[in-house]
Amino acid sequence: MPGLVIEEHTLTVPLVWTDPADDRTIDVFASVVSREGGEHLPCLLFLQGGPGHEAPRAFGSPTGPAWLDAALAEHRVVLLDQRGTGRSTPVADEHLESGADAVAEHLTHLRADSIVRDCEALRQHLGTETWSVLGQSFGGFTTLAYLSTDADALDRVYITGGLSTIDRSPDEVYALCYDKMREASERYYRRFPEHRDRMRRLADRAAAGGIVLPDGEVVSVSRLRSVGSALGTDHGWQAVWSLLELDPASNAFRHDLAAAMPFGGRNPLYFVFHESSYASGHATRWSAERVEPSDFAEDPTLFTGEHIRREWTRTVPALRPWRDVALTLAEHEWPAIYDRGALLRSDAQGAAAVYVNDVYVPLEFSLETARLLPGVRTWVTSEHEHNGLRTGPVLERLVDLARGRRVR
């Protein structure tokens, strides 16, 4: 990694920040990346999407994050593995030995509000009075939680595809996401009309138990449809197209299908914890499953996105051990995580990319939240999908926008 200086930091922090009497601890890991000679630049904290994914590793271009070079021009970049991921006491199958109730209780302490407390501990450890933050997707949700409690610690905020609703229910979010996926499905089939029949035949094959993955999963119709999650990314249609062009009896199809479906076994936290990311003062109770529109129930060619299903805890081998944990968390009453008044008072400065066709974080609710942060200028664009930060010069444009420059 020529030209980069990387410092690694591991802190031991409370598992439960809100209860001093609880002596359980976890480790939180972060790397601080700079260019040679830039070790004294101000810090930019990167908050990864998810929940349940560790921060990217700083390999530099061309294999590292596309935005890293631009960020390093003016910052040291802090890559935090959010609690429960990467090297920050990761959640793993072996923890299930302590029992589903204990694991579920542990997971309730991995939310964005606790991640903010970890960030503050890390900021103080690094000796920086303030820092800026770049929040992608769920990282943007965490940035909103940060602004709700510790806005004074933040210099500039940059949010990409992460202006979450702060007060709407998970049901409202997932219902609107179905609408977005209906539109994405129809756009896809307008370009490739012959694939609608192929998808219908695949759904019939799945319903008959005729699609079995290398790990033994008998693919359900709902799992098959979840490959549509790729349509929320800049080039994801190519993955869907390539998959549907394959012979469903081939090894290539089975392996590529396994890779294309979200919510696998690498990050169980992404599955069991996913709906809680929209639960600020709510229980989720399998929200996406409950609000499924009738046309989705009737038409198996309509793709789904980040809509999880309870049945996957029975049909997906990697998720089966997590069934009881997922069922328990679905009934958990999650406390509110955002503070509308604090956001309005935060005087936050920065910029946010809001993607017109975002199938995960709906445009309409993002714009509602943007109105609470008048100092965070919005770039509303259809040039990119949800992963635009990783595929284009999104960060550069946000920096220009925050500084009052015209976004090209």
Image (cartoon, rainbow, N blue to C red):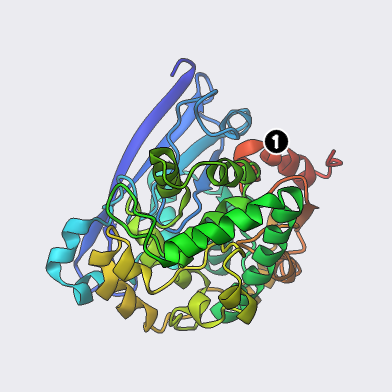
Q: Is residue 355 left or right of residue 15?
A: right
* Quarter of the figure that contains the N terminus: top left
Mark 1, Cα crowd under 10 Å, few <14 / some 14-19 / many 20+, is few
Residue 170's image quarter? bottom right
Estimate the x, y position of residue 186 in percent, counting from the top left. 72, 60
Q: Is residue 97 left or right of residue 29?
A: left
Above or below — where is 238 with respect to 340? above
Residue at the spot 64% in from the left edge and 61% down from the top edge: 359
Residue 185's image quarter? bottom right
Closest to the observer, 284 or 225: 225
**Residue 39, can we see it?**
no
Where is mark 1, residue-wise? 393
Q: Residue furthest left?
A: 97
Above or below — where is 76 with respect to 351? above
Closest to the observer, 150 or 77: 77
**Residue 2, can we see it?**
yes
Find numbered disc 1 in the image and state the secondary structure of the residue it sits on. loop
Estimate the x, y position of residue 87 in percent, counting from the top left. 30, 45
Estimate the x, y position of residue 225 in percent, counting from the top left. 52, 61
Residue at the spot 57% in from the left edge and 50% down from the top edge: 230
Above or below — where is 156 with respect to 331? above
